[in-house]
């Protein structure tokens, strides 16, 4: 019996003694005495916890309605979104591509300064399977800052601000590289380089974090780390992006992504696909590598009945997961997004963070307990 099965049995038994948990599953979960949850919730402010849980209700005809529960949600309280910004980058790359004749998800392209032919489908797969930074930048150059920020605003996915890439030596450079698209009819189309707007400083709470940070040459600067020009993707906006991909029919047309149903299915497939099924070494990239909820603290295989459509992020001590979790065999279906900070020494950019000790056990246990409470 593996650890997931043991936890499942334990929590199932516990639920028999608490029939009232169905009313507010998030509240009862956060009140758990489980050490992985309790040690975090006892210091919730220190860990800058924010959580959204969506109960998905289906009537006898299958029509869906949502019941959202939140903990400490405030888009004015900044957290670094890390790799979660790759989620809209991947979708919007397909949206732009969809508006170009004689292209598909398998269309190839080149970026200025790189002779390698890239394929949109492969770069998107890398973004979700192992959260590849370079792949997200390759997709980004096809669009640029202004395009992505404008499209998110048009869909009502605000607040949001993309101001830097996630790879490259000059990640905040507003000059977007030119790209060449190789169309299916053997023609090409060039998208010239362009200079996007310089980002303005954010005006939010908690933009100055910690007591110090490591600068170039590992020099310790005894000042808070400034996030005012960094990317901004609050939890509500992230969660609502996921809703638009999973349940687009419940939004106005102006609020949805302009992609084909086939493209949407490809995004969803990529989101739930495990690294081993995407061609990565399962020893290095185990099932839970990018599945923080439920499985982030184990290297065991995820049961085949459980599908997790998600995007994670972790950097500068902040860890985030945004997921739609389904188990058709056990009739489980819910959405969950959460962020947690674990930086005990208060120093940023030193790569000394308590991901394994604090963050992953918390997120995994949060997902497990909500999974069990949703079992029917």
Image (cartoon, rainbow, N blue to C red):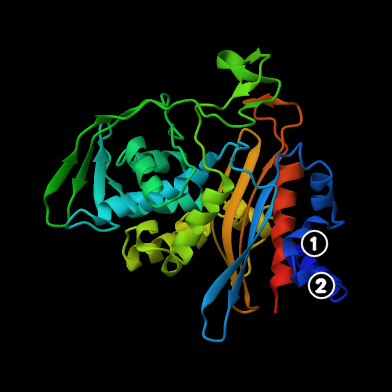
The answer to which of 106 and 300 lies nearer the viewer is: 106
Label 1 neighbour load within 10 Å: few <14, some 14-19, many 20+ = some
The quarter of the picture where the C terminus appears is bottom right
For image coordinates 58% across by 48% down, the residue present is 235
The answer to which of 176 and 207 lies nearer the viewer is: 207
Residue 354, x across and y down, in percent: 73, 38
The quarter of the picture where the N terminus appears is bottom right
Q: Is residue 89 visible?
A: yes
The disc at residue 28 is 1
For image coordinates 63% across by 78% down, the residue present is 331
Whether label 2 touches label 1, CB < 8 Å: yes
Q: Is residue 306 visible?
A: no
Residue furthest to the bottom: 60
Horizontal side, residue 38 vs residue 56: left or right: right
Q: Circle 1 — which element?
A: helix
Q: How many marks?
A: 2
Horizontal side, residue 256 vs residue 60: left or right: left
Label 2 neighbour load within 10 Å: few <14, some 14-19, many 20+ = few
140 to 295, vertically: above or below: above
Q: Quadrant of residue 282?
A: bottom right
Q: Earlier in the sequence, mark 2 or mark 1?
A: 2
The answer to which of 132 and 24 lies nearer the viewer is: 24
For image coordinates 39% across by 57% down, the residue present is 255
Cα separation, mark 2 vs mark 1, equals: 9 Å
For image coordinates 14% across by 46% down, the residue present is 188
227 to 214, vertically: above or below: below
51 to 159, vertically: above or below: below
Residue 330, x across and y down, in percent: 65, 78
Residue 215, x across and y down, in percent: 58, 17
The disc at residue 20 is 2
The answer to which of 289 and 309 lies nearer the viewer is: 309
Q: Circle 2 — which element?
A: helix
């Amino acid at each position: 019996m593996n650890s997931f099965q043991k936890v499942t049995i334990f929590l199932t038994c516990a639920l028999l003694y608490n029939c009232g948990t169905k009313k507010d599953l998030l509240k009862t979960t956060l009140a758990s005495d489980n050490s992985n949850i309790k040690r975090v919730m006892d210091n919730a402010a220190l860990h800058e916890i924010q959580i959204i849980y969506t109960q998905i209700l289906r009537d006898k005809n299958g029509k869906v309605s949502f019941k959202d529960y939140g903990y400490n949600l405030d888009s004015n309280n900044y957290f670094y979104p890390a790799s979660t910004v790759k989620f809209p980058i991947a979708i919007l790359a397909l949206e732009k591509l969809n508006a170009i004749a004689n292209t598909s998800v398998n269309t190839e392209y080149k970026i200025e300064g790189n002779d390698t032919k890239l394929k949109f489908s492969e770069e998107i797969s890398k973004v979700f399977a192992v959260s590849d930074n370079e792949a997200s930048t390759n997709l980004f150059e096809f669009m640029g800052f202004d395009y992505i920020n404008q499209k998110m605003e048009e869909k009502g996915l605000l607040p949001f601000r993309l101001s830097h890439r996630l790879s490259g030596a000059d990640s905040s450079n507003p000059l977007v590289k030119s790209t060449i698209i190789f169309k299916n009819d053997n023609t090409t189309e060039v998208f010239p380089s362009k200079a996007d707007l310089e980002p303005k400083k954010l005006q939010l709470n908690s933009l100055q974090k910690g007591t110090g940070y490591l600068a170039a040459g590992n020099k310790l600067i005894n000042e808070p780390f400034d996030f005012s020009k960094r990317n901004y993707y609050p939890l509500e906006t992230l969660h609502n992006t996921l809703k638009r991909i999973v349940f687009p029919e419940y939004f106005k047309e102006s609020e949805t992504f302009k992609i084909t149903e086939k493209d949407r299915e490809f995004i969803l497939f990529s989101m739930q696909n495990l690294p081993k099924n995407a061609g990565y070494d399962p020893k290095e990239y185990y099932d839970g590598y990018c599945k923080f909820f439920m499985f982030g603290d184990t290297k065991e295989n995820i049961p085949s009945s459980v599908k997790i459509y998600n995007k994670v992020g972790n950097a500068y001590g902040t860890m985030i997961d945004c997921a739609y979790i389904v188990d058709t065999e056990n009739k489980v279906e819910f959405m969950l997004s959460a962020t947690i900070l674990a930086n005990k020494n208060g120093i940023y950019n030193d790569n000394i963070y308590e991901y394994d000790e604090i963050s992953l056990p918390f997120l995994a246990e949060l997902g497990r307990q909500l999974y069990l409470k949703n079992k029917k």
